[in-house]
Image: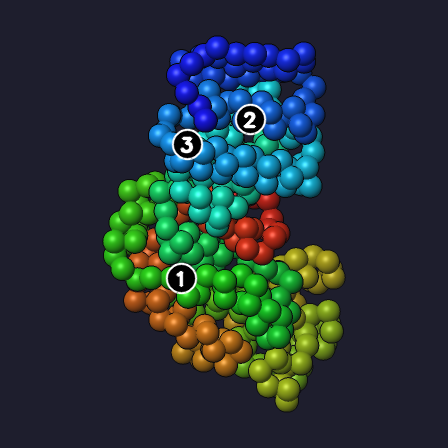
Amino acid sequence: MFGDNQEQNVGTGAVAVQAGNDVHITQNGLSYSEVRDVALDVFRANFFQLAGPAMETAKARAEEITEDFLKKLQQENPDGFGKGQDPDFQHALFTVQREYARNGDKDLGDLLIDLLVDRSKEEQRDIVQIVLNESLSTAPKLTDSHLAVLAIIFLFGYTQNQGIGNHAMLGEYFDKYVLPFSTKLIKNPACYQHLQFTGCGTPRMNALTLEGILASTYSGLFLKGFDKSEIENKQISIGLDTNLFMICLNDSEKIQVRANNLEVLDERFKANGINEDDQVKIREIFQMGKMSHDEIREKCVSIRPYMAPVFELWTESQMNSFSLTSVGMAIGHANIKRLTGEFASLSIWIN
């Protein structure tokens, strides 16, 4: 138990910490165990005093999350142990310890650990480091529903998976990245007001439908196709080249362009040396026979029925008109990574 008595007995090679206010510890060449000891010393020196069992609970939680963090750091970024001597990183670690010690929420703890591991990868004070520091203080102010909303808005509004080549893969994508959050989404306006208050996002004037986002990002999955004769009618010189064309995913009697969106199509043009005249004609064909928004929704729900309430919540809540700040993106990113175990680097979106 931590008390007011500052008398200490220090063994050989041990680290002594004694102060009435904030303390940071600096050492060189810290090992796993040394970083652990330093981290717990910082917690003891900085955490406010509680009475009786509450202090013991807080101490146990601090030790738990410190150990969990160091294990994950060792797996993902062993070089991060060197950050144990950085005052700013010690402060970030103490923030994680303090917040977990207060509530003991395991999901929050895992989220904070992911954010802190990402923070350990930043070598200099840049925008990513600043955003991650702020995210560590902001995430504890959010509920599971807030975190789920941030994850889904980030997923659909700010990312695309170019590896989705058919409807089966789309279903697997929904299973991995949408299903874990689908039952936690809410449309209560207070949810979005609080997200705005905590600096995670801001409302915008124009609303984006989820069907529209999917139609733009994954157009190739929602095409009705065209007859082979269109290739000849438009006098496309490469003919029915399988690098650019394939059997339509939604109608096996027809053909479609082999690309999910115009960006991917342009990359295929470059990779296959397609001439400018053919490029113009193929882009025209790509825009033909697109599914309506209602048809896109029906297709997604037929693939995964649990998508029905996701579409409904997106339509009826402020999710469709809520822009994320850098902090909102960082927390949404970390929440996805927490449940899926992997995701692209945050620096792709924040740099």
Crowding at mark 3 (Cα within 10 Å: few <14, some 14-19, many 20+):
some
Label 3 close to label 2 by CB (< 8 Å) = no
Reading the image, the residue beneath label 2 is 39
Crowding at mark 1 (Cα within 10 Å: few <14, some 14-19, many 20+):
some
Q: Which mark is residue 82?
A: none
- Dividing the picture into quarters, in which one does residue 9 lie? top right
Q: Earlier in the sequence, mark 1 or mark 2?
A: 2
Cα separation, mark 1 vs mark 3, equals 32 Å
User: Which amino acid is tagged 2?
Assistant: Ala
Cα separation, mark 3 vs mark 2, equals 17 Å
Closest to the observer, 113 or 223:
113
Point out residue 276 in the picture as x, y percentages from the top left corner: 65, 61
What SS does tag 2 mark? helix
* Residue in the image at 68% along x and 77% along y: 246
Q: Does the image show residue 131?
A: no
* Residue in the image at 60% along x and 37% along y: 67
Q: Residue at the bottom extreme?
A: 253
Q: Earlier in the sequence, mark 3 or mark 2?
A: 2
Q: Does the image show residue 110?
A: yes
User: Which amino acid is tagged 1?
Assistant: Lys
* Residue in the image at 61% along x and 28% along y: 36
Closest to the observer, 65 or 129:
65
Point out residue 154 in the picture as x, y percentages from the top left corner: 46, 53
Reading the image, the residue beneath label 3 is 55
Label 1 close to label 2 by CB (< 8 Å) = no
What SS does tag 3 mark? helix
Above or below 109: residue 281: below
Reading the image, the residue beneath label 1 is 184
In the image: residue 335, left or right of residue 345: left
Cα separation, mark 1 vs mark 2, equals 34 Å
